[in-house]
Image (cartoon, grey):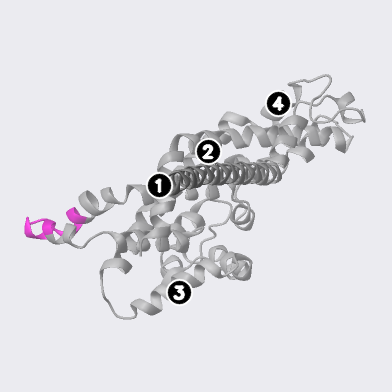
Amino acid sequence: MKVNEMVLSIRRLNEDTVLINKRSRYIHKSKAILFSLFKFFILVGISYIILGPVIGIISNSFYSSTDVYNPSVFLFPLRPTIENYALSYLRLDYWKTLGFTMLYTGVITVIQVMIASMAGYGFARFDFPFKGLLFGCVIITIVLPTHTIMLPLYQHFRNWDPMGLASLFTGGPVNLLSSEAPMVLMTLFGVGLRSGLFIYIFRQFFRGLPKEIEEAAFIDGAGMRYTYFRIMLVNAIPSVVTVTVFSMVWQYNDMFYSRLFTVPSGRNITFRLSTIQATIEFVDRVRDPMISQLYVYSGVVLVLLPILIVYLFLQKYFMEGVERSGIVG
């Protein structure tokens, strides 16, 4: 009898254990499903907050004049039209202005990547006097608002006379405003748009690379220039792509320096976009600001497309570079 009772109790215990395991698995799955739903709704909410304005702009760019004052229209126009794009395309002088903009942005980006990578490599690998102080100055350029130095910058390039050389050769200071020269000069000397941040990104990346790579190159007889351009810079491709994307986007969208240095609107498509509503109201006699705003929306989409295409092509390398730059160092 005792043996039978023991067998029965063991069976009951096993059944209870199976039931408990099933219950725990059910609870675990239920928690996982609830957590997944919670994450889904949070992501949808955040995505809507970020993408909501963009969706609204794209939707409004297809509105007709009747859709604007129709209270029943929301997001989806009843009479969609592409006339807004046609007029915006014309007033932006799209391909010519975009060509100048991409050329200017490309030149500045290439210069910025080269200068920032060299400076970052120097801070990461070499010891020299006042290294900490100079890198502190780099950090200051990141946190210092550009509006605080706009007046000195304007006056400096309005009367550009480095070490008196301009007065020596031309008889007086040179006015560099109304051209791209101020931005090119600032970028060449490592103080261009967000150059401090790019120097920091490269410094962090190069600090994470093992020094044995350079030591092996030096043993094989490679010089400093060969080591940097053919070995270190090649290994830093993720950071190069990251800085390239950041630099291109910020230069492409820059309005502050374009207005400060009075760059002609025909050479900067973002600057030209800011004047499109006034142009259409004056030239095409569109007096209703609600209607003229539709052309601004279509112009925004046209200006956004090129830089969005570039980002889509470089997205994989961009994300890898962001991760590496944030982890190393």
Tell me the SS state at disc 4: helix
Left or right: 286 in relation to 303: right
| Residue holding disc 2 | 100
In front: label 1 or label 4 = 1
Residue at 78% across / 20% down in the picture?
80
What number is the disc on residue 166?
none
- Asked if one can make out residue 265 in the rendered structure from this viewpoint, the answer is no
Of labels 2 and 1, the one closer to you: 1
Which residue is the site of mark 1? 320
Q: Which amino acid lies under the numbered mark 4 shown in the image of this protein? A: Tyr
Nearest to N terminus: mark 3 or mark 4: 4
Q: Amino acid at mark 2?
A: Phe
Query: Residue 106's image quarter?
Result: top left
Q: Provide the secondary structure element on which disc 1 rests.
A: helix
Counting from the top left corner in percent of width and height, residue 247 is at 48, 50
Instruction: Tell me the mark number nearer the camera, choosing from 2 and 4.
Output: 4
Q: Amino acid at mark 1?
A: Glu
Cα distance between the residues tagged 1 and 4: 36 Å
Q: Which residue is mark 3?
A: 137
Neighbour tally class for label 2: few under 14, some 14-19, many 20 plus, Cα within 10 Å: some
What is the magenta range? 216-227
Prevalent SS, magenta region: helix
Q: In the figure, is residue 192 to the left or right of 29? A: left
Res 85 label: 4
Mark closer to the chain start, 2 or 1: 2
